[in-house]
Image (tube, rainbow, N blue to C red):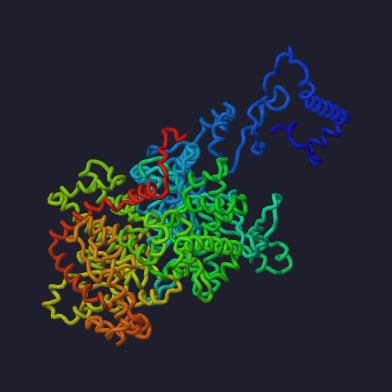
Amino acid sequence: MSDERAAPNKHSPRLQRRQHSSPSALSASCCIFLFLFFFFFFLLLLPPFFASKPPFTMAAPAPAARERKPSTSAPITDFQGPVGPPGISRPKHKRTVTGFGPQDIKSVEASIPEGQRAAWKKFSVKEFKTKEDFEKEVVRHVETTLARSIFNCDESAAYNGTALAFRDRLVIEWNKTQQQQTYADQKRVYYLSLEFLMGRALDNAMLNVGMKDVAKDGLADLGFRMEDVISQERDAALGNGGLGRLAACFLDSLATLNYPAWGYALRYRYGIFKQEIVDGYQVEVPDYWLDFNPWEFPRHDVTVDIQFYGGVRKIKNEAGKTVSVWENGEIVTAVAYDAPVPGYGTSTTNNLRLWSSKASHGEFDFTKFNSGEYEASVADQQRAETISAVLYPNDSLERGKELRLKQQYFWCAASLFDIVRRFKKSKKAWSEFPNQVAIQLNDTHPTLAIPELQRILIDVEGLEWDEAWSIVQKTFGYTNHTVLPEALEKWSVPLIQHLLPRHLQIIYDINLNFLTYVERNFPKDRDLLGRVSIIEESQPKMVRMAYLAVIGSHKVNGVAELHSDLIKTTIFKDFVKIYGPDKFTNVTNGITPRRWLHQSNPRLSKLIASKLGSYEFLSDLTLLHKIEAYVDDKAFRKEFQDIKFANKVRLANFIKEAQGITVNPASLFDVQVKRIHEYKRQQLNIFGVIHRYFEIKEMSPAERKKVQPRVSIFGGKAAPGYWMAKTIIHLVNQVGKVVNNDPEIGDLLKVVFLEDYNVSKAEIICPASDISEHISTAGTEASGTSNMKFVLNGGLVIGTCDGANIEITREIGEENIFLFGNLAEDVEDLRHAHFYSEFKMDPMLQRVFDEIRSGVFGDAGQFSALVNSIVEHGDYYLVSDDFKSYIDTHKLIDEAYKDQETWLTKTITSVARMGFFSSDRCIDEYAEMIWNIEPVKPTSNGA
């Protein structure tokens, strides 16, 4: 802005000089001001004056229009025509921080002056498409964003420069996608998951946009290897197990299939934790993954104030209606961070929004600091930051339980505020909310979103209860991930009363209305009321979150056929009676082939593409069936086998580098990597390893020559407060310490525990597996997805008849999977027999326990709780019942592996028949059966 138009400043030397040099300037300015004031006042009086007069025309020619100077603080207006005196253009087009509603876009676009539009279009950022453009972007970021040069650009700087170059490219498509989806004004799905185990972003982004080869050549020109650059990235620490990885696969498929979707989670500052193994024990340390994260965009202008504690007061509003007011308490601010999620083979780039917590009144209290209270001056900020500090804080203490509940509500409330705000921009009636919004609850963690939306609708927006509840039920869908009663979340009534007093009232009202409905329809079944009540009548009373999720959702789905059948006959049996079977459905889990084949096993992906003629199978995995025609092709078999061995060599090198253990890639690689839990039965696996160890020890040298060498690989984290799971990790490491250093055993058996298991490590492990273990107690694993990843990469499975193992068996054939153990329908009878019948321990397992108790693997007292859970406390997970079957099945595996030609046929056939297990198929099923959404295909210009 020119000096003449600048706001007056009494300290301005220039203004002071004018005042001294021109005494008459002030009086002249006053005259001009008074003239303009009365002129505009006269114009305001003209409309009513002329309203009673006949129309007339003015003969004076219209002066040329004067363009108003651009201003970022222009007022938001709805003016469509000229405003003010003739000759002055209307105000600059309106801008908002969070974008426009669909109805506003056309008028806003038309309001932008042609000159501005032309300039903006001329200088809009374009995506790089050539190697030279890519190199230019990398060098620009290295020199300007990172302040480095050719002389000090190391691999870390090369990664950051490359990531920023691709991030810039994604942002262009991200902006176009959001504009187009808003313009289309179609229904969106919002996926609420406490975990999103995304893995590394750079390699995924390069592959999805089809520019990895360009980047590889460009980095080579700049002096770097692609593999070294990719390895610099730290995994996003936003999850732990299959729940989070499933959510990440779903985001990939949603974008690939062009569905309008957002993910919502928390931005965990330290992840769940970084796992270190010290003297065989798991030690948790912070995961500083956010030290530099080029993939996120801080949205400091998108904040939500979240309330906790306080009390509820009923008042009458202006209309005489009694309303509830939640007041006082603590306010914590949620700050949004966005991460782009690119689709494969499409420009659609969806959004993952993460919430970070901070103190609502600032992070620093100067008054306390100046009075000497230095620690207290930052105490509010530290207390607020704990909400988004760690995934799954240890809840063995009451304060830990409160923090977990606080964390869940903080995330749900911020996400619901964002969703409602976006809907309100459309200016549609509230009855249209379920036609514009679908919210999927990934397990029970986001269940508080149900009473929160009800609170918004009745307390904030003023809807009647019944209308609001109808909207809530039509909006939510709930995915159940467990049939274990102890894994279904419950929160104590006193805790919710203390932390979320208004929500407890709403939950009680929901429960009252539901029980009234049940009693009216089932008047003779009084016990039913207690069984299905959201409030469990225990000491203290508990809120059953899974029941609230079922009652507040229009659809409930399991994640494998067996699991979906079990929830209808066990934990939700009564709800099937109340609502009927149509409310419950199944969507078997899947995985994205882009990451779990194309990215993790590029040579195998290339081999398949060479036979199918393209990479189309990555977006239609059912095309894999065509490679079964090559199962007897010698060249194909040779290449397939070479790829597997190369992947095993890569993993062996990684094990040597990470753990210092030398393993023979010619051995059978036996892998179990997943979250450590008793129901997943890593203890059964390590007991089997101990049995194998002593079996080999007792063999003669001649007998040992016939033994199939094996490497048993474990990986996974135990929850910080889960002592039994930590004991399993300790036992695995102690067994490895003994076995790996026994000169009699050599390469016949190795035991490896890979610390800090994550997605990036899984991308190395899955392609190298010969056999993977999915050995949960029948009826306890909802689905499992790691089994799918291993089979898709040419590994076979040993497993129980549980979760998705059943459907994998159906697809690939019983001859290509090794099943063992008891069936789900026998589990309860076996548990009962452990307590009320004679309990006989299998002799082989008894030998294992005797060796553990003898101190061969260290202090026996460290493992007594693990052994006694089986021997003395009922063996809830049926380790003793399945042990012999497990050992016998491993003998079958040893024999089958010796016949490499038959084994190769099994693996190729299995890969060819895995087309059903794509997350793309899952998303299409959710879209059709639960969400009722349609894709928004990108246009050429992204408008």
Q: At 61% from the left edge and 33% from the top edge, which residue is drawn? A: 93
- Across and down, in percent, residue 647 comes to 26, 58
Q: At 57% from the left edge and 67% from the top edge, which residue is drawn? A: 496
Above/below status of 341 relative to 904:
above
Residue 271 in view of the camera: no
Locate residue 398: give its quadrant.
Answer: bottom right
Residue lying furthest top in this view? 59
Nearer to us in this view, 291 or 834: 834
Locate residue 828: give its quadrant.
Answer: bottom left
Nearer to us in this view, 144 or 42: 42
Above/below status of 133 relative to 798:
above
Point out the image quarter for the N terminus.
Answer: top right
Q: At 60% from the left edge and 62% from the top edge, which residue is drawn? A: 502
Q: At 75% from the left edge and 31% from the top edge, which residue is drawn? A: 4
- Across and down, in percent, residue 727 comes to 38, 77
599 displayed left or right of 259 = left
Residue 709 in view of the camera: yes
- Across and down, in percent, residue 315 comes to 69, 58
538 displayed left or right of 671 = right
322 displayed left or right of 721 = right
Number of labels in the image equals 0
Residue lying furthest bottom in this view? 854
Nearer to us in this view, 89 or 937: 937
- Across and down, in percent, residue 41 comes to 81, 28
Residue lying furthest front in this view? 524
